[in-house]
Image (cartoon, rainbow, N blue to C red):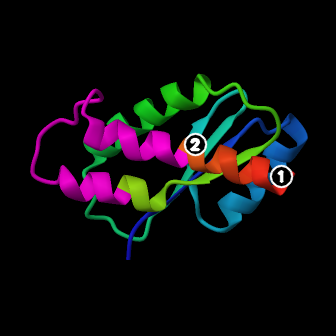
């Protein structure tokens, strides 16, 4: 079973604290708890390269900070992150500029924004 990764953007403080409590009850680890960013992980597979995961968290944080969207944005990055971690399993470092790393994450951001716009 794969690890689960969820990203919440533009949460107000009241909503953010509610999400934090609920996610902690569901055994999620908070990876990023920034001003308007909440990025969490639920560990289902402990055979993950922690250094690679830390590098991906930095990349996601930098991408999330550049998003200028209005309203709450929820992105499930489970499939994207697990596929990247699997692809780079035997490689020492992940290059941020590699399109095989940044492209799936960018696509997930774009898809979430389009899905939210469609619901309006």
Dot 2 crowding, Cα within 10 Å, few <14, some 14–19, many 20+: few
Q: Percent position (x, y) of residue 97?
A: 28, 27
Q: Percent position (x, y) of residue 16?
A: 79, 43
Q: Is residue 118 above or below residue 66?
A: below
Question: Depth-wise, is mark 2 or mark 1 nearer the camera?
Answer: 2
Dot 1 crowding, Cα within 10 Å, few <14, some 14–19, many 20+: few
Q: Percent position (x, y) of residue 12?
A: 85, 36
Q: What separation in Å lies between label 2 and label 1 (alpha carbons)? A: 26 Å
Q: Percent position (x, y) of residue 35?
A: 71, 27
The residue lying at 38 percent from left, 77 percent from top is: 1
Helix, strand or loop at label 2? It is helix
Q: Looking at the image, which is closer to me, 82 or 117?
A: 117
Label 1 sits on residue: 18
Can residue 20 be spotted in the picture?
no
Left or right? Give the position of 30 relative to 14.
left
The residue lying at 56 percent from left, 42 percent from top is: 109
Q: Looking at the image, which is closer to me, 58 or 84?
A: 84
Q: Which of the two labelled residues, at mark 2 and mark 1, occupies the earlier sequence position?
A: 1
Left or right? Give the position of 40 relative to 116.
left
Helix, strand or loop at label 1? It is helix
The residue lying at 36 percent from left, 37 percent from top is: 102
Q: Looking at the image, which is closer to me, 43 or 90?
A: 90
Among the 4 quarters of the image, the one containing residue 105: top left
The residue lying at 76 percent from left, 55 percent from top is: 21
Magenta-drawn segment: 82-108
As for residue 114 lying within the magenta part, the answer is no
Left or right? Give the position of 4 relative to 70.
left
Give the total of numbered labels: 2
Label 2 sits on residue: 110
Indicate which disc residue 114 carries: none
């Amino acid at each position: 079973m794969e690890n689960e990764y969820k990203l919440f953007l533009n949460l107000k403080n009241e909503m953010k604290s509610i999400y934090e409590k609920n996610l902690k009850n569901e055994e999620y680890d908070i990876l990023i708890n920034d001003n308007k960013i909440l990025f969490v992980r639920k560990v289902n597979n402990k055979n993950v390269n922690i250094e690679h995961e830390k590098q991906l968290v930095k990349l996601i944080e930098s991408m999330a900070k550049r998003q200028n969207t209005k309203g709450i944005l929820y992105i499930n990055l489970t499939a994207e992150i697990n596929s990247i971690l699997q692809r780079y399993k035997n490689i020492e470092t992940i290059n941020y500029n590699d399109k095989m790393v940044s492209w799936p994450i960018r696509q997930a951001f774009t898809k979430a924004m389009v899905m939210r716009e469609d619901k309006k």
